[in-house]
Image: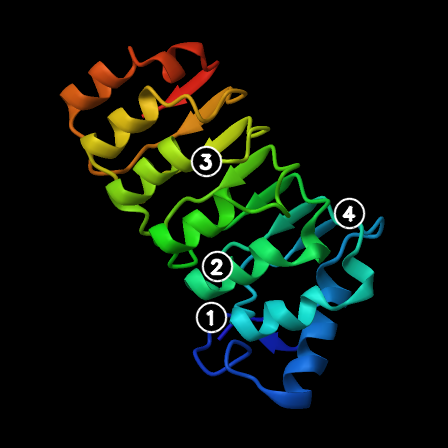
Amino acid sequence: MPSLSGYHIYDTAEPCNYTGQKLIDTMHKVVTDKLSEDGRELNLFGCCVGVNGIKVIAEDPRIVSIKRLNLGGNRIEDAGAHFIAEAEAFSKVNWVEFGGNNLGPNGLRAIIKSKVFRKLRTLNLYRNYLRDEGARALAEENELERLEELDLAQNEIGDEGLFALASSTKLPNLVSIAMDNNFTTMEGRSDARNGSLFRKCQSVNL
């Protein structure tokens, strides 16, 4: 089992399932190891902090200035997304990665309606389970108007979700979108490129 500075990664027993003082001590060490020197980036990729871990981290005064938050592979799931979307500790974040966290449409809705994330410009959601429902929610309900970059690769999205996004009016500042390795058809991807949103984007990876 690989490890990072004394705590294991992707072990089902730790640190995702720690509780009490052990959880607090471990999350303190995670922040110590993973917060950049200038305090503006917290890279938790692969640390598997889980829902309880991110709640402890959100109370750490050292993260008050972070602008980039990498939560890839942390098993936060929808419950964690709901918590993060309401945690004022992340109100300065303008770049966030939620890749590989088992997020579904419910967790996505919490993110895109978050008042905490109103400064967000880059949102990475690759390798989750958003499916067509999540893509439609993003296309029709998104409130993060500053979003410029969006990664939805590997989310089991089909043509229905693709077409909804292609013509969405809820992403006015989007310049780049990635939707590769989904469940879309070749014909669907070809037609979607003519959608009003995709036509104005500088980069469209389907």
Q: Nearer the viewer, mark 1 or mark 2?
A: 2
Q: Residues within 10 Å of mark 1 (few under 14, many from 20)?
A: some
Cβ–Cβ below 8 Å for labels 1 and 2? yes
Q: Is residue 161 left or right of residue 58?
A: left
Q: Is residue 117 left or right of residue 108?
A: right
Q: Residue furthest right?
A: 38
What's the mark number on residue 142? 3
Q: Which element type, helix, strand or loop, lies under badge 2?
A: loop
User: What percent of the width, then of the height, locates residue 105?
Assistant: 34, 50
User: What percent of the width, then of the height, locates residue 199?
Assistant: 38, 10
Q: Residues within 10 Å of mark 2 (few under 14, many from 20)?
A: many
Closest to the observer: 169 or 71? Answer: 169
Cβ–Cβ below 8 Å for labels 2 and 3? no
Q: Is residue 164 visible?
A: yes
**Distance from Cα at disc 3 to Cα at disc 4:** 26 Å
Q: Earlier in the sequence, mark 2 or mark 4?
A: 4
Amino acid at circle 2: Gly
Residue beneath disc 1? 10
Q: Nearer the viewer, mark 2 or mark 3?
A: 3
Q: Which element type, helix, strand or loop, lies under badge 3?
A: loop
Q: Which element type, helix, strand or loop, lies under badge 1?
A: loop
**Distance from Cα at disc 2 to Cα at disc 4:** 20 Å
What's the mark number on residue 73? 2
Tell me the quarter of the picture where residue 88 sits: bottom right
**Distance from Cα at disc 2 to Cα at disc 3:** 24 Å
Q: Earlier in the sequence, mark 3 or mark 1?
A: 1
User: What percent of the width, then of the height, locates residue 169?
Assistant: 41, 21
